[in-house]
């Protein structure tokens, strides 16, 4: 394993071998599946990705907030290796095994709130969200689910309905699942309003257009991910959570992107002491192995009839071994602290970039966004954003964009990233921003 934590550029990016693979791909992989940066990876470790042309790229995306513990983290690799040699699969619904229980024990201990909890394990974030909605509807006997502007919850039929953005996620893929209602989200950089005020507007919308007694759950990302790294103004989440509690509506926190130390706490809800009734997790939970969970109040979760939840692979033992290793690494290496240190390093530097093309630099811990606009306006500038990202890619830094308007660059480095490497990646980004904004 090449573990050198350095950026090495031996060819242009993508190099000839990647371009050749990309040609092969076109003849066999479905056209609807895209890659941000078609550089084909052979190995990865910590915060570096090695490609088929001998280049090493700096990873500021963590495979979309997954490899929080670093790529191929030894704490994940070793237990996974052991598990895969012992047994690969039995199906927990057929003959169970202990590490599924251990993951649920960890989830009970780590997720917000000290109430008694139960968890069910699944394979993907979307599957966890689907199940949280199933559980909420069955537990309350109510049909409606409330979601927010800019929300992202997945690409399956129900989660497409819950996701806000049409292109590329939804357009032409309907009809969508019914009984999903959308309300305004607090977006401080654009609405400039106190959190409580936006929450009141959202609640009034629900009360007037729907009626609280029809609502099974309010589903929210405590900091929105794909929608633009939107951190609601203080007071917004607690006000929504309180209304839910007062009205017998379940508060579901989708912490699939924000969870597992990413924002400088185990979960983003922790920052405002919000305790969700149900929480969905995935991504960072297992250091790169596919695993997701719904965790919630014991009475809600246990109200589901026998055999009403499950799936062939949910809580696969290899993924559970990965999760236990990843959680161990997060705890032992204090990766929540590491995320805060990343925020402390990155945010001031980005905030010092004086350009009228930046509307906002925001973030918590190692979940950081830069929103680009036409200078002097609030008009989103997705073209500029794409150009900056492309320049970073060409120089060997993997950077992702997001946002309803496609105008946010987001940084999601592995939490174990070497600070010298992170700084080098940042310098590339800063230079790209300067080049494309100085006219
Ligand atoms: N909820 C908050 O961020 C996944 C998706 C990228 P899956 N986000 C990355 C893409 O374009 O498909 C996500 C999320 C939140 C749910 C999901 C869905 O998780 O594991 O991708 O199904």
Image (cartoon, rainbow, N blue to C red):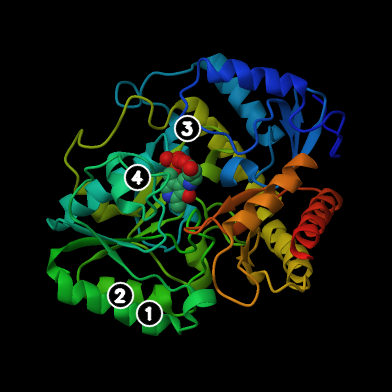
- Other-residue count near label 3 (Cα within 10 Å), few / some / many at <14 / 14–19 / ≥20: many
Lateral position of residue 436 relative to residue 168, left or right: right
Considering the numbered disc 1 on the image, is that residue within a helix, a strand or a loop? helix
Real-space Cα distance between discs 3 and 4? 36 Å
- The image's mark for residue 198 is 1
In terms of sequence position, does the residue under pointer 4 or pointer 2 come before the other?
A: 4
72 w.r.t. 110: above or below: above
Residue located beneath label 2 in the image? 202
Q: Are marks 1 and 2 in contact (CB under 8 Å)?
A: yes
Q: Is residue 410 visible?
A: no
Residue drawn at point x = 36 percent, y = 26 percent:
96
Whether label 4 lies within 8 Å of ligand 1 gets the answer no
Q: CA distance from mark 1 to mark 3?
A: 43 Å
Q: CA distance from mark 2 to mark 3?
A: 41 Å
- Picture quadrant where residue 220 is located: bottom left
Q: Is residue 61 above or below residue 49?
A: below
Q: Who's the residue at 36% across and 61% down the image?
A: 115
**Circle number at residue 99:** 3
Q: Nearer the viewer, mark 4 or mark 1?
A: 4
User: Residue 283: x, y in percent?
Assistant: 52, 43
Q: Is mark 1 within 8 Å of ligand 1?
A: no
Relative to 265, does residue 33 appear above or below in the rendering? above
């Amino acid at each position: 394993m090449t573990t050198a934590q350095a950026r090495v550029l031996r060819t242009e990016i993508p190099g000839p071998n990647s371009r050749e693979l990309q040609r092969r791909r076109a003849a066999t992989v479905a056209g609807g599946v895209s890659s941000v940066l078609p550089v084909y990876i052979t190995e990865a470790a910590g915060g570096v990705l090695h490609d088929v042309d001998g280049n090493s790229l700096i990873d500021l995306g963590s495979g979309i907030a997954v490899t929080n513990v670093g790529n191929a983290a030894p704490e994940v690799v070793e237990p996974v290796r052991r598990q895969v040699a012992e047994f690969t699969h039995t199906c927990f619904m057929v003959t169970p095994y202990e590490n599924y229980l251990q993951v649920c024990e960890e989830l009970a201990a780590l997720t917000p709130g000290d109430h008694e909890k139960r968890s069910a394990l699944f394979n993907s974030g979307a599957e966890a969200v689907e199940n949280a909605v199933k559980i909420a509807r069955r537990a309350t006997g109510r049909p409606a689910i409330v979601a927010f502007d800019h929300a992202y919850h997945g690409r399956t039929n129900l989660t497409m309905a819950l996701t806000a953005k049409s292109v590329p996620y939804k357009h032409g893929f309907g009809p969508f699942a019914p009984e999903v209602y959308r309300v305004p989200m607090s977006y401080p950089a654009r609405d400039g309003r106190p959190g409580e005020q936006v929450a009141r507007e959202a609640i009034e919308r629900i009360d007037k257009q729907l009626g609280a007694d029809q609502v099974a759950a309010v589903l929210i990302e405590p900091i929105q991910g794909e929608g633009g790294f939107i951190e609601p103004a203080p007071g917004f989440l607690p006000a929504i959570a309180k209304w839910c509690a007062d009205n017998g509506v379940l508060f579901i926190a989708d912490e699939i992107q924000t969870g597992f130390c990413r924002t400088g706490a185990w979960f983003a809800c922790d920052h405002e002491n919000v305790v969700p009734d149900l929480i969905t997790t995935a991504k960072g939970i297992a250091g790169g192995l596919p695993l997701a969970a719904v965790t919630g109040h014991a009475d809600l979760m246990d109200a589901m009839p026998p055999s009403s939840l499950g799936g062939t692979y949910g809580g696969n033992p290899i993924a559970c071994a990965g999760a236990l290793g990843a959680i161990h690494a997060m705890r032992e290496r204090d990766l929540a602290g590491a995320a805060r240190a990343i925020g402390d390093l990155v945010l001031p530097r980005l905030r010092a970039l004086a350009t009228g093309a930046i509307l906002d630099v925001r973030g918590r811990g190692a979940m950081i966004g830069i929103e680009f606009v036409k200078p002097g306006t609030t008009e989103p500038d997705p073209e500029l954003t794409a150009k900056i990202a492309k320049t970073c890619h060409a120089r060997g830094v993997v950077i992702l964009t997001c946002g309803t308007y496609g105008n946010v660059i987001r940084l999601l480095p592995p939490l174990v990233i070497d600070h010298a490497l992170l700084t080098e990646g940042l310098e590339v980004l800063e230079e790209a921003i300067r080049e494309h904004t100085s006219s």
